[in-house]
Image: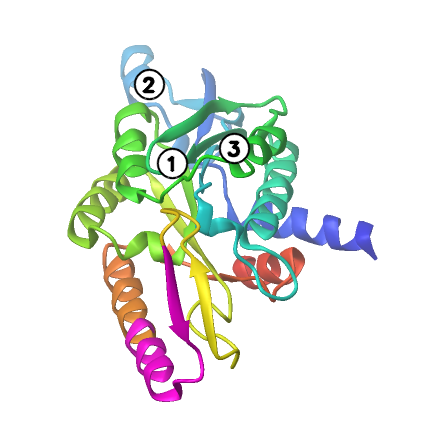
Amino acid sequence: MILWTKNVLSKLYRKFFSPSGIVLADAREYVAGDDTRLINWNISAKTNALSVNNICADSGNDIIFALDVSGSIKFGTKKQSKISLAMDILKTLSQLSEKNNDRVGCLMFSHRVERYFPPRRRPQCFPSTIDKIVHSPEKLRTDLLVALKFLNKVLTKRSRVILICDTFALTVGRKAILTQLHILKSRHDVMMFPMMDNNDMLVAWLGKITVEDAETGEVFEINTNDIEMMSRVATQYAAYQKLIFKEVENVGIKISPINTQDSTAEFLFKLFK
């Protein structure tokens, strides 16, 4: 079953992430039946004979994962945490990328750039590095703007950028984030996977509880039995989230939310359809 899933995902991946370009060898003489779109008119004009570009191989893709490693990404209330699901998806997509002759890189960010691995064809030590950063005792906040500015600066070749971040990352500095996303989209193929959990804004009836902000360390008290207040907060957040997602999609970026209730295979099958 696992082998079948990997084989199917590999085929769907190749179809979904079609090669970004082709590598052309030297031109050769035209042969009846050749694709006329491959005719090299410059060489044909000089030699007075039709010549076509000889396709050598596809160039593959440069795929960059931009992963949020801030404190909030460790949240997860039932099946798994956001970071465990994100790492599983990153690992699976990296393996599929390598089989497809793609170059894979990874940016790990919080309120700063934590680590950056430029795209390579050989496997890189993403999981161990991510694990060290996420489980660091330091309080790491989310700042998506930092990651976007960094990517817009370092990526010179057209790439496929996959942003994996906590949903809350889109709520701070929205206008500036949308501006940087627009710039990134104009130069690269961009997708966004916001990490979600069913209890991001819905807490069980536990009475008055003391909670700590995973990113700032701030401690405050919440009365989870105040149904009206909790419902109002959840409704307002859902509406705001819907607005932000719509604005990002208006930039031309595909948003595919990831829920901690989903498995990696389920998410990728849904993504590739």
**Sequence-first disc among 2 and 3:** 2
Mark before the other along the chain sequence, 3 or 1: 1
Residue closer to the observer: 85 or 63: 85
Q: Secondary structure at mark 1?
A: helix
Residue 82 shows in this picture: yes
Give the residue number, with chain letter if any, for mark 3.
133
Q: Given this view, does label 3 or label 1 mark the residue nearer the observer?
A: 3
Magenta span of residues: 219-237
Which mark is first along the chain, 1 or 2? 1
Q: Residue furthest top?
A: 47
- Say if mark 2 contacts mark 1, CB within 8 Å: no
Horizontal placement of 95 versus 25: left or right?
right
**Residue 95 percent coordinates (x, y):** 65, 37
Q: Where is the N terminus found, in terms of image quarters?
A: bottom right
* Identity of the residue drawn at 34% across and 52% down: 169
Residue 44: numbered disc = 2
The residue under the point 42% across, 28% down is 114
Circle 3 crowding by C-alpha within 10 Å: few under 14, some 14–19, many from 20 = some
The kind of residue tagged 3 is Ile
Q: Which mark is residue 37?
A: 1
Residue 231 part of the magenta segment: yes
Residues at badges 3 and 1 in contact (C-beta under 8 Å)? no
